[in-house]
Amino acid sequence: MSRGHWLAVALGLAAAAPAQAEVTIKLATLAPTGSAWHDLLRELGRRWEEASGGQVRLKVYAGGTQGSEGEAIRKLGIGQLQAAALTNVGLHDVVKEPQALTTPLLFRDEPEMACALERVRPRLEEVLLERGLVAVQWSTIGSLALYCDAARRTPAELAGARIFAAQGDPGVEAAWRLAGLTPVVLAATDIVPALQTGMIECLNNVPLYALATRTFVKAPWLIDLPMGFILGVTVVRRDTWERVPAELRPRLLAAARELGGRVDAEVRRLNADALEVMKRQGLQVVAVDPEAWRPALERSWAVLRGGVVPAPFFDEVLAARDACRKGLQGRGR
């Protein structure tokens, strides 16, 4: 049984408890203690407690103290946690649809992605609800790009490069192969030593990660291509959410979504700042023509569509992107 099906069964078997005077929600996040993400989650806890008159209390466990995203999902399933702040990639063991947003070259920029996300968000939330999870807030963690050990200006120069591929995600591994790269499957915790030893030559991540882990020192060439987006989503177990009095839930959702907008703005600033810091410390940005790269990278879509993301939803995201692109162009972009 897959982890997603197991989680759905575990959540489905949890009996809906009657409303109580106080609902305590334990939330796990990989966000470092004291980071912008952690601060905003703590503020969310204060807002929820205030909006509910003390009936809802949010306890945030930051810095991966509850384990990896996979471990947080397992703990959600058995009730040790009632909530988690996860990435769309980390969610793939439960629902695969959100991973469509990380498709290489699918979107030209963040506004286009955000527009498409808003169009497909109801379906994403419906899929999560079917798995026993309520999405209370979405945010953008950043735009992915390749950091490499050399200036790889063309697909031919990138061909055969050893690139990090996360454990437990064979579809993405196959997609990298179709794009002409050589994926090396590792745990995320092994990225830094793998770069130091030459086991991998490239990794796909956001500026904040590259700066925080200093991976840009060994991979100091940034290929300036939109390689997809990492999203964050805060989910709460459905049975826990339904213990919150119905009249309070809209207030809690409003607070969460307002803070999600603030997370987007703050993370956008932090990623831009991180990029400037790395440039001052030797990072070289390699300007490339996206259209020259498109044939190689779009070959990966054949695996992502159907192999990673259900084909009907992938097509729905494509249609949303096209509608957004037409609308944004109509407004003079």
Image (spheres, rainbow, N blue to C red):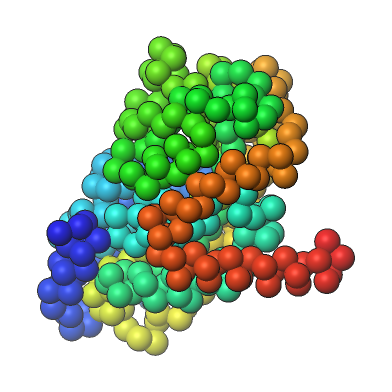
Residue at (45, 71) in percent of width and height: 312
Does residue 159 appear in the picture of this structure? yes
User: In the image, is residue 67 above or below residue 187?
Assistant: below
Residue 266: % across, % down? 62, 49
Q: Quadrant of the C terminus?
A: bottom right
Residue 185: % across, % down? 34, 32
Q: Nearer the viewer, residue 37 or 6?
A: 6
Residue at (84, 70) in percent of width and height: 331
Residue 181: % across, % down? 49, 31
Does residue 257 appear in the picture of this structure? no
| Residue 110 placement: quadrant | bottom right
| Residue 22 placement: quadrant | bottom left
| Residue 325 placement: quadrant | bottom right
Residue at (61, 18) in percent of width and height: 150
All told, the count of numbered labels is 0
Residue 243: % across, % down? 25, 78
Residue at (33, 74) in percent of width and height: 129
User: In the image, is residue 302 above or below residue 149?
Assistant: below
Q: Nearer the viewer, residue 304 or 253?
A: 304
Horizontal side, residue 192 vs residue 241: left or right: right
User: In the image, is residue 285 above or below residue 77?
Assistant: above
Q: Nearer the viewer, residue 219 or 301?
A: 301
Q: Residue furthest right?
A: 332
Q: Quadrant of the N terminus?
A: bottom left
User: In the image, is residue 259 above or below residue 283?
Assistant: below
